[in-house]
Image (tube, grey):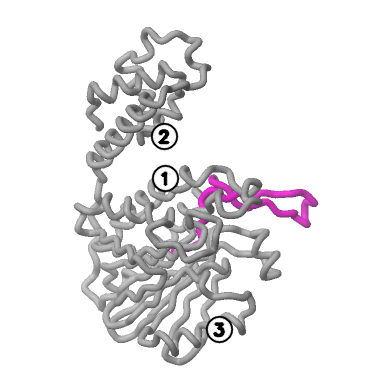
Amino acid sequence: MHKWQDKELRLIKELLNKGETVTSIAKLLGFTFSQVEHVIRRFNLKEGIHPTNISKPIKLKKEEIIQVTKEIGENLYKNYKEIKLEIPNAKKSIKGKEEHTILDISDVHIGMKNEVFDAKSGKKIITYNHKIFEKELAILQKSIFEIHSLLSNVYALKKLTIFVLGDLITNDRIFPEQVFEIDKVVGLQVWDAINYFTKFFVNLLNLYEHIDIVCIVGNHGRSTSNLYNEPVENNFEYFIYKVWEKQFADIKRINVIIPSTRFYIHKIYNWKHLLMHGDAMRGSTDSYIERQIKELTLNLGGFDVMHYGHFHKLKEREISDKVIVKQNGCWISQESYALKVYKTYSVPKQHIFGCNDKRPETWGYKIDLRR
């Protein structure tokens, strides 16, 4: 439970006096709605505040803005340092052949609202928004628990590696037409990605003794609409990943790896996994994409499994007998953009598979997030 400081109480009372709501104060200071609501009631912080102030817009002088911003920043950092994650104990593994689980996560597009024409009803329907994202995340977690329960009767499943392949967020700054396709701005998308997936990772510690999270940025996280090759550190998703890194810094069972490049090779046993978002590949036809993958195998070489997303369609490609190619899907059902570009609707699916020291892939599932 958070221990409220006098400085925090004064700041909340000041924000209430300037007309801020409980919701806006919670977002500004990094607390939950219930925390702010509780502290206002507990310390009677609305006492002395005139009711007409509640509807007045905030009008701050420059020096007041600087001071309030400074206090908010200090408060956020202080509260962040005090976050105590409740880490569960991992399920005991059987004494059998050890298998390593690998999960690909990409193209979540938090903040997107997708609408399509439904031929059956003759009406426009919503196939993706924040509520659907929450439902799909719950389905993903449940599916992983079910898969682990099934396979842990045969294998010792102690370690999980999660490859985050980018486009966790949709952004609202890079395409002008996106104003019609989002239900929240990029700043809120970022915090949703941090909060929801932090809980998701912690919940998976019920199953696995150790989790590695390897994070690649996507193209929707970029900070500008220009397509120039901006530094990875400018990407909004880099910020998400750095917060995860700090959140889990003192938890030995979770390790967050954040490359400063758009391509990265990660080793599991002696198998080399090449990670990328996929936007570096151009075109939409299978033959053109596969030709580019072949060029990558020739120019980069030295990898056994290739992971990427971006194309919003889950596939396993056969390029050679030595390289496994995992093209990950998205979280959006019947995406309008995918229909326009690829002439096919997207299906929300994500890859999960296993490997051991002898084989780069031993078992695999395509998790359907719709059910």
> Which numbered marker is on residue 231?
none
* Amino acid at the residue labelled 2: Lys
Q: Could you say whether the residue bearing mark 3 is in a helix, strand or loop?
A: helix
- Packing grade of label 1 (10 A; few <14, some 14-19, many >=20) is some
* Amino acid at the residue labelled 3: Glu
Instruction: Look at the image and say whether residue 115 sits in the magenta stretch.
Output: yes
On the image, the x and y values in percent for residue 47 come to: 36, 9
> Which numbered marker is on residue 191?
1
Residue contact at pointers 1 and 3, CB within 8 angstroms: no
Q: Which residue is mark 2?
A: 27
Q: Quadrant of residue 266?
A: bottom left
On the image, the x and y values in percent for residue 336 come to: 67, 59
Residue contact at pointers 2 and 3, CB within 8 angstroms: no
30, above or below 337, in the image: above
| 278, 137: nearer the viewer | 278
Q: Which residue is mark 3?
A: 290
Q: Is residue 114 left or right of residue 137?
A: right
User: Which range is magenta?
Assistant: 105-130
Q: Quadrant of residue 20?
A: top left
- Packing grade of label 2 (10 A; few <14, some 14-19, many >=20) is some
Residue contact at pointers 2 and 1, CB within 8 angstroms: yes
| 153, 169: nearer the viewer | 169
For marks 1 and 3 on the same chain, the one whose residue lies earlier in the sequence? 1
Q: Residue at x 41, y 19 (%)?
A: 16
Q: Residue at x 58, y 48 (%)?
A: 129
